[in-house]
């Protein structure tokens, strides 16, 4: 095995192999998405997300590609390592720059090693794992992080000496339901009636929702989407405007527009709120919510009920709504372990972080068990099999 690595400071410089390898890998790994982030200044050295994409060759043949960035901060990653940065500083080591393999601002699970056609997957993963530590040494980074990767990828990198870290997200699964009414039959009566009350409260406020078609994603509507996005992130101390208004305008005009699922709430034709979602490979990714006035339960209706209804109507089997929010469990979302892997250069800190993530994995497993015991499902609470009317 003779491994060579090409480091690309722009996705455009490896467009052809990237397009070939990313086919079928979902919208966030597409050339269009990563190029759009660069072109609209969401990523780049000034944003602290310097593209450092990797093309790995074995004996002159492209065998793996990875979306990578040199980072001088830890924002927009959703796998939180500020304590690790602080530990490096206290022991006299620089934590930044670090190398991140992942999708900016997007805590969605998926491939992090793209395998070109005709290349064996195990060969691709072995080459990527073999090469990545050498890349980290060459770049002089303190650490390498691969976020929200698949199980087969985590296994390959752990065998190469990376540390595995677990997190928890809540994901919705259709479980064979064809309509929202089908889905609600799985709930115990208390939670089912709560859904209906909250839906009625929004309807009684004169609010109606619908999905905008691709043709309706006009500059005026996308300006409203950005206004709502900005209002939400600005309302929280931890919020950051990672995406520019130009990004929202451009994605609505791009080849990705068919992947956008913008849910629109209005009163008498005046927009009140929106959710910005992306679909791909059978999954609906809930990304952003915002409103220009507070309406009780509107966030629930638009972000969960309407999203699930839309996912079912379009034959999608899963919804990932991002990081945080144990409250999602009451809406029918199940706890799911997410994985990241990490290489730490400094041996003493690597040993300490190894102990930390080992304990953390146990805590995450217990947290999942606790969430599962508190689920809203009818069979778990009442001892019934799913079925019946949502009017029970």
Image (cartoon, grey):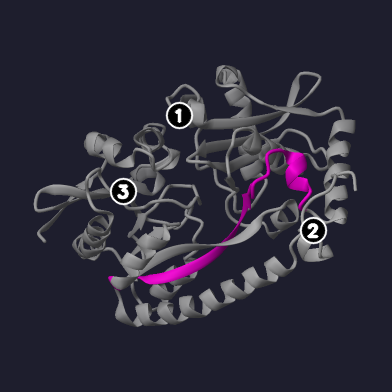
Where in the figure is residue 153, as x and y percent of width and height? Answer: 36, 60
Residue situated in front as seen by the camera: 117 or 247: 117
Q: Do the residues bearing badges 2 and 1 touch, measured as CB atoms within 8 Å?
A: no
Q: Mark 1 points at which residue?
A: 256
Q: Mark 3 points at which residue?
A: 114
Where in the figure is residue 373, as x and y percent of width and height? Answer: 72, 69
Q: Is residue 93 above or below residue 272?
A: below
Spatial CA span between label 3 and label 1: 19 Å
Return the disc, 3 or 1, that comes first in the chain's sequence.
Answer: 3
Spatial CA span between label 2 and label 1: 39 Å
Q: Mark 2 points at which residue?
A: 378
Residue at (77% x, 54% y) in the render: 386
Categorize mark 3 by other alpha carbons within 10 Å: few (<14), some (14-19), many (20+). many
Categorize mark 2 by other alpha carbons within 10 Å: few (<14), some (14-19), many (20+). many
Where in the figure is residue 169, as x and y percent of width and height? Answer: 59, 58
Q: Is residue 318 visible?
A: yes
Quarter holding the N terminus is bottom left
Asked whether 213 falls inside the magenta stretch, the response is: no
Spatial CA span between label 2 and label 3: 40 Å
Q: What stretch is highlighted in magenta?
A: 160-186
Residue at (74% x, 62% y) in the render: 375
Residue at (84% x, 44% y) in the render: 390
Along the horizontal axis of the image, is 4 left or right of 383?
A: left
Asked whether 168 falls inside the magenta stretch, the response is: yes
Residue situated in front as seen by the camera: 151 or 140: 151
Residue situated in front as seen by the camera: 61 or 229: 61
Along the horizontal axis of the image, is 141 left or right of 308?
A: left
Residue 140: image quadrant is bottom left
Circle 1 SS class: loop
């Amino acid at each position: 095995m003779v491994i060579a690595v090409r480091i690309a400071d722009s996705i455009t410089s490896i467009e052809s192999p990237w397009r070939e390898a990313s086919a079928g890998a979902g919208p966030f790994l597409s050339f269009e998405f990563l190029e759009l982030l660069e072109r609209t200044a969401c990523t780049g050295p000034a944003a602290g997300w310097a593209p450092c994409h990797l093309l790995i060759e074995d004996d002159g043949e492209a065998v793996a590609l990875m979306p990578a960035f040199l980072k001088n901060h830890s924002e927009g990653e959703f796998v939180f390592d500020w304590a690790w940065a602080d530990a490096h500083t206290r022991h006299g080591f620089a934590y930044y720059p670090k190398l991140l393999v992942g999708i900016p601002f997007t805590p969605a699970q998926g491939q992090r090693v793209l395998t070109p056609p005709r290349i064996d997957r195990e060969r691709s993963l072995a080459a990527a794992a073999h090469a990545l530590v050498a890349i980290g040494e060459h770049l002089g980074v303190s650490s390498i992080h691969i976020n929200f990767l698949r199980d087969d990828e985590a296994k390959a990198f752990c065998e190469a000496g990376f540390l595995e870290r677990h997190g928890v997200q809540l994901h919705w699964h259709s479980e064979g339901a064809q309509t929202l009414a089908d889905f609600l039959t799985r709930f115990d009566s208390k939670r089912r009636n709560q859904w209906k009350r909250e839906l009625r409260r929004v309807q009684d406020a004169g609010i109606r929702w619908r999905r905008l078609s691709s043709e309706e994603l006009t500059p005026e509507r996308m300006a409203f989407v950005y206004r709502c996005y900005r209002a939400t992130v600005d309302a929280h101390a931890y919020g950051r405007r990672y995406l520019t208004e130009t990004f929202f305008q451009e994605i609505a005009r791009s080849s990705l527009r068919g992947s956008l699922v913008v849910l629109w709430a209005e009163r008498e034709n005046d927009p009140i709120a929106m959710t910005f979602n992306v679909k791909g490979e059978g999954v609906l990714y809930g990304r952003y919510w915002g409103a220009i006035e507070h309406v009780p339960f509107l966030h629930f209706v638009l972000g969960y009920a309407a999203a699930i209804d839309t996912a079912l109507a379009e034959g999608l089997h899963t919804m990932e709504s991002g990081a945080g929010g144990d409250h999602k469990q009451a809406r029918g979302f199940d706890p799911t372990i997410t994985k990241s892997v990490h290489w730490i250069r400094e041996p003493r800190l690597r040993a300490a972080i190894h102990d930390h993530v080992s304990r953390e994995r146990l805590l995450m497993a217990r947290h999942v068990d606790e969430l599962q015991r508190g689920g809203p499902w009818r069979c778990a609470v009442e001892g019934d099999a799913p079925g019946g009317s949502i009017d029970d």
